[in-house]
Amino acid sequence: MNAPQKFVIAVDGGQSSTLALVATLEGRIIGAGFAGPSNHVHEPGGVERLRTALSQSMTEALSNAHQSADNIVSICLGMTGGAEMAADMVQPHFPQARLQSYYDSVTALAGASMAQPGVVVIAGTGAVAYGQLADGRSAKAGGWGYIMGDEGSGYAVARKALLAVGRARDGRGDATALTEALLAHSPPKSFDELVRWSAAAEPGEIATLAPLVLAAAAGGDPVAKGIIEEAATALTELVAPLVALFGGRGQIKLALAGGNLAPDRGLRAPVLARLSRWRDPASAGRRVRAAP
């Protein structure tokens, strides 16, 4: 009798959602599972939210792949937060599997660079940059959460849009197409309802407004364009602290990742444009080479 086929699981635990994939040892995906956010584990209810997101996404992925936990030989977790805690939650359910758990910046760079040295800038609900050398030395910039950091993130873009709508309402800021866009596409249908909704919304919910800002900027709204330009500058600035990690001269391979830097999103082009002009004054004008 032939031995049962073996499989691997990869999990991307983000601030807005959690994705689990079951794949063959050759890398062919055979099942996927989705769940809610799995970050902010230190907030009230955060540990249970993480546990639920991991359980739901991985159970659904296994079900869709028509496989059992016994057939899984390796698991890799890429988590926005709680990487160590996530490993402790998952391992008892897969006692035979080799388990690796990292923060998502590590797995994003590995996926974007095919495990080669380089830097990745990620802009989803949050924002972070991460660099790693061939010998394993690494450095990180940003990613300190929506209170202390995440400049250029989907949350930051959306929050600035909400601020702009409030300023326009008061007459302290310019009128903007963002007012109509936010009221037309978010749960609230009036300004007062928008105020109440935004006060109670989670960061991931706020970040869902970011595509509306990108669309308004593409439509020519000056306020939205200003917000996107500021976000692009903030994301580009994340690269500078990582350059010293590489030392010497030459180019640094850099990848862009995250929903707000996807090829069809309007934030990618201004970030690439800034990176193409960027020079590191401390490294004799060193350049980064970003993927198009």
Image (cartoon, rainbow, N blue to C red):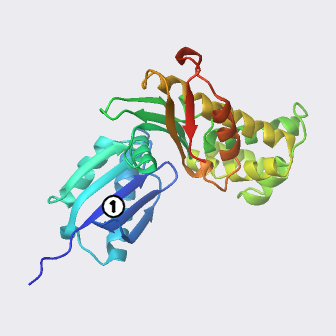
Identify the residue shown where x is 79% and y is 42%: 224
Identify the residue shown where x is 12% and y is 77%: 3
x and y percent of residue 53 in the render?
39, 57
- Name which residue type carries label 1: Ser
Which residue extends farthest left? 1
Secondary structure of the residue carrying tag 1 is: helix
| Image height of 48 relative to 25, above or below | above
Write down the quadrant of residue 271 in the picture. top right
| Image height of 290 relative to 31, above or below | above
Q: Position of 181 compared to 44: left or right?
A: right
x and y percent of residue 56 in the render?
37, 64
Q: Position of 188 compared to 72: left or right?
A: right
Q: Position of 184 compared to 73: left or right?
A: right
Question: Can residue 277 be seen by looking at this rendering?
Answer: yes
Question: Can residue 142 be seen by looking at this rendering?
Answer: no
Which residue extends farthest top? 282
For the residue pair 157 and 135, the one nearer the viewer reads as: 135
| Image height of 282 relative to 38, above or below | above
Residue denoted by label 1: 55
| Image height of 25 relative to 49, above or below | below
For the residue pair 110 and 194, the one nearer the viewer reads as: 110
x and y percent of residue 99 in the render?
23, 52
Task: Tell me the quadrant of the picture where the N terminus can be found.
Answer: bottom left
Identify the residue shown where x is 28% and y is 63%: 8
Identify the residue shown where x is 34% and y is 64%: 58
x and y percent of residue 225 in the render?
80, 41
For the residue pair 77 and 120, the one nearer the viewer reads as: 120
- In this figure, what is the number of numbered marks? 1
